[in-house]
Image (cartoon, grey):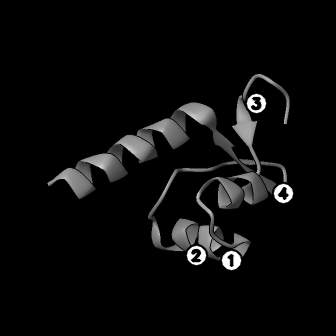
Amino acid sequence: MAAEQAPYLTTAEVAERYRTTLNTVRYWRHIGYGPKGVKVGRKVLYAAAELDRFDAELAKETAA
């Protein structure tokens, strides 16, 4: 990845970020958990800001 973070990440990049598998990220999307993806054609992309929102949500859950 470039020095700057891309505005949208692929499912594979999201899986790498959360150290999980592609199938887990797909399952999260299926059950409505995790960062919200945006369909672009046949691909699902994730906005960097959405991943930051999900990170904050996870931090809040673990702090409670």
- Closer to the chain start, of discs 3 and 4, is 3
Residue 42: numbered disc = 4
In this rendering, the answer to whether 37 lies above or below 52 is below
Amino acid at the residue labelled 3: Ala
Name the residue type under label 2.
Tyr
Q: Earlier in the sequence, mark 1 or mark 4?
A: 1
Q: Say which label, 3 or 1, has the lower sequence index.
A: 3
Image position of 64 with respect to 6: above or below? below
For the residue pair 61 and 33, the one nearer the viewer reads as 61
Q: Residues within 10 Å of mark 2 (few under 14, many from 20)?
A: few
Q: Is residue 12 left or right of residue 19?
A: right
Q: Position of residue 52 (x, y in %)?
A: 49, 37
Q: Which residue, given by chain and number where applicable, does mark 3 sit on? A: 6
Total marks in image: 4
How far apart are the two marked residues, 2 and 1, measured between alpha carbons? Answer: 6 Å
Q: Are marks 2 and 1 in contact (CB under 8 Å)?
A: yes
**Residue 57 shown left or right of residue 64 in the figure:** right
Task: Give the residue number, with chain letter if any, for mark 1.
Answer: 23
Circle number at residue 27: 2
